[in-house]
Image (cartoon, rainbow, N blue to C red):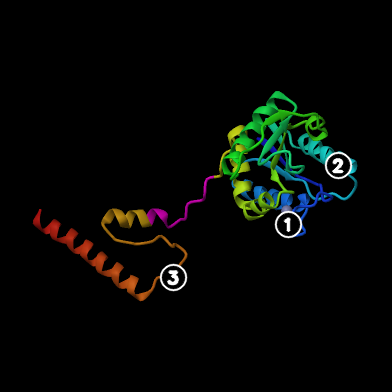
Amino acid sequence: MINIIISPSQQKWNACAIDNCTEQEHCFAIGNKIFELLNDYDCNKLLIQPIFGTEQETLNKVVKQSNAFVKNNPADASFHLDIHTDAGYAGHGASGFYMSERGKSFIIQVWREISKITPWGDGNVSRRDLKVLRDTTATAGLIEVSFHDIPEEAKWIHLNIDAIAAAIVRGIVATTGIVKFEKPVHWAEKFYKGLLDLGMVINERRFKDPVNRGECFALLLQLAQILLRAVTRRNIT
Ligand SMILES: [Zn+2]
């Protein structure tokens, strides 16, 4: 089993360039969507919730929650992803940070997927001594999705929450190898296939919908023809 810890930025003091938003708000929108997408995958997962307090207090609590989750859920491997947006006009687009070598290969995959969807040039992946990367027991990476203090980039973030979350999930899947749960097969599937094999034309599955009169006539006529053909064949042989 693989543990995945999603840790959206707690930086409510960082103002986003548009919509009276904060870094924390749009990062939690991304984090919530990631968590929803991860429901389809076989893994243990934790979404760290908004924490009240100063920067130091929130950092301490994030690390503590992440490490407690790893301790309480024995797994083959654990991954911690911190999700942020950037500021300071130091560049454009996405960059990633790591401390360990395993963290590096993790964040490279996530950064690569994000950089594919940003409409501008991106930063790099580099080593940085940050508490969430240094003190977490899970293999850790930090992604800066884009710049929230550049109105154009902030707007792109807000309009692309789902696409950003999907890209991050692709990066997580590529590194961790977590697999999708198989969708349950409806009990009627085998009967549907059997009718197709007999030559019955059915345009859609829609297993839970009622049958209307027109569909009933079509099915009955086809069934009559199939039976007639079978009887005729038997008489000839
Ligand atoms: Zn925002």
The Cα–Cα distance between marks 2 and 1, rounded to whole angstroms, is 29 Å
Q: Indicate the secondary structure of the residue bearing disc 2.
A: helix
Against 195, residue 75 (above or below) is above
Residue 236 x, y percent position in the rendering: 9, 56
Mark 2 or mark 1, which has the lower sequence index? Answer: 1
The Cα–Cα distance between marks 3 and 2, rounded to whole angstroms, is 53 Å
Give the residue type at disc 1: Ile
Question: Which stretch appears magenta?
Answer: 182-191
Give the residue type at disc 3: Pro
Q: Which quarter of the image is occupied by the N terminus?
A: top right
Q: Is mark 1 within 8 Å of ligand 1?
A: yes
Residue receiving disc 3: 210
Of residues 115 and 142, the one drawn nearer to the viewer in this rendering: 115
Between circles 3 and 1, the one closer to the viewer is: 1
Q: Indicate the secondary structure of the residue bearing disc 3.
A: loop
Between circles 3 and 2, the one closer to the viewer is: 2
Q: Residue furthest top?
A: 101
Residue receiving disc 2: 61
Residue receiving disc 1: 18
Residue 186 x, y percent position in the rendering: 47, 55
Residue 95 falls in which quadrant of the image?
Answer: top right
Residue drawn at 70 percent across, 48 percent down: 31
Residue 59 falls in which quadrant of the image?
Answer: top right
Q: Residue furthest bottom?
A: 213
Q: Do the CB atoms of the residues marked 3 and 2 lie less than 8 Å apart? A: no
